[in-house]
Amino acid sequence: MSPDIIDETTEIWFGPQHVSAHGWAAKLTLVGDYVVECEPHAGYFHRSAEKVMEFRNFRQGSLIMERLCMLEAFLAEYPYVTAVEQIAGLEVPERAKIMRTIMMEASRIHSLQFWWGQFSAELGFFAMLIWPWVDREWFLNAFEELSGSRHAVSYNTPGGVRYDFTEKSISVLELAIERMESNMSKFEDMLMGSPVFRMRTEGIAQYTAEQGIKWGLSGPNIKACGIPMDLRKDSPDPNLAYDLVDWDVPIIESKEHPGESDAFDRMVQRFKEVETSVDIIRQLLKQLPEGDIIDPKARSKANRLPEGEAYGRVEGTRGISTVWLKTTEKAQTPYRVKIRGPCFNSYYSLKHLVPGVRFADFIVVFGSLDPYPGWWDR
């Protein structure tokens, strides 16, 4: 081959029009079919959520938050809600704490079911697109039974939750969990037992725990390196119920490359996340007490907030999601809202992870990090 051909580079835009891009874009520089440079470009999905929330009252703000990532709506809305509670001085009833935690873990499972299907399909495993997505319909049924909506659930509200559990809503949720558990071994075998899937993911996009921390990764993307970093365990939220259950942070401890993770490890990590969420839900359902589902003073206290600022956060499906909220005296709307989603860091880590892989493996690298555009184009 001519040296001129080897040195020749080609620039390709992956997205925003590509079917696997989901509204984002990255400029790739190729030599042959190898990527030598990756330049992520945010902004194609921007919706000005932070500015919009300055014109919404403190009970409406969570509706904007959940639309940043409706795959994990129960989790996405929580950082804003807990920030409002801190400034307003609201006390969340015990029943509401447990219901919040149950539905947040159910939302985590639903989001991971979506990821299994999407990631597998983008690698050509279309059977694994259909099966988990059929099972996630059962969780959407549970969300609809509880809130009336399948995606934009609007469940958490300052001081508690909007809707109480019923025997039927609990029954539908338990059916969804049982359905998923009955198929978990099949899903594991279809992916972990597939020589083709292993060939496409093992050794791809490897990084160490030190690199992941430096880049600001969190959630499954850092736990797959063997780091048990999880807000649910490290800093339990007093308005949630993780301190009432006995559970361990799921991690991957790879024997082949300890302290590192590749695309395959991050897939296995997400199976462990689901198992942990099921364990938490089952323990909390047994502890559900009678009582109020919202602070009786929530309506009056959340209408006008005193001057102050608060920092709300949650261990989401994709990592740590946070909201910084600032208010002025007798405010009806926020003075300033700053959102930091978990995916901005994982998106820009592509700059370090992609160079050196084949062009066909670029989507493997991206998909294994499970970034969602709404979390960075906020």
Image (cartoon, rainbow, N blue to C red):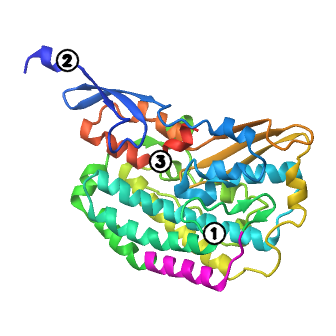
Question: Mark 3: which secondary structure?
Answer: loop
> Is residue 185 in the magenta section?
no
Question: Mark 1: which secondary structure?
Answer: helix
Q: Earlier in the sequence, mark 1 or mark 3?
A: 1
Q: Overall secondary structure of the magenta stretch?
A: helix
Residue 113 picture quarter: bottom left
Residue at 90% x, 55% y: name it: 301
Residue 358 on image: x %, y %: 25, 36
Q: Identify which amino acid the numbered label 2 is placed on.
A: Glu
Which residue is labeled 1 in the image? 147
Q: Is residue 40 left or right of residue 304?
A: left
Q: Are marks 1 and 3 in contact (CB under 8 Å)?
A: no
> Is residue 176 in the magenta section?
yes
Residue 295 on image: x %, y %: 86, 65
Q: Earlier in the sequence, mark 1 or mark 2?
A: 2
Report crowding for label 1: few under 14, some 14 to 19, many 20 or more residues within 10 A (C-alpha).
Answer: some
Residue 358 seen in the current view: no
Residue 22 on image: x %, y %: 41, 43
Report crowding for label 3: few under 14, some 14 to 19, many 20 or more residues within 10 A (C-alpha).
Answer: some
Q: Identify which amino acid the numbered label 3 is placed on.
A: Gly
Q: Is residue 353 left or right of residue 164?
A: left
Foreground label between 1 and 2: 1
Which residue is labeled 2 in the image? 8
Q: Identify which amino acid the numbered label 1 is placed on.
A: Ser
Q: Is residue 143 left or right of residue 329?
A: left
Which residue is labeled 3 in the image? 259
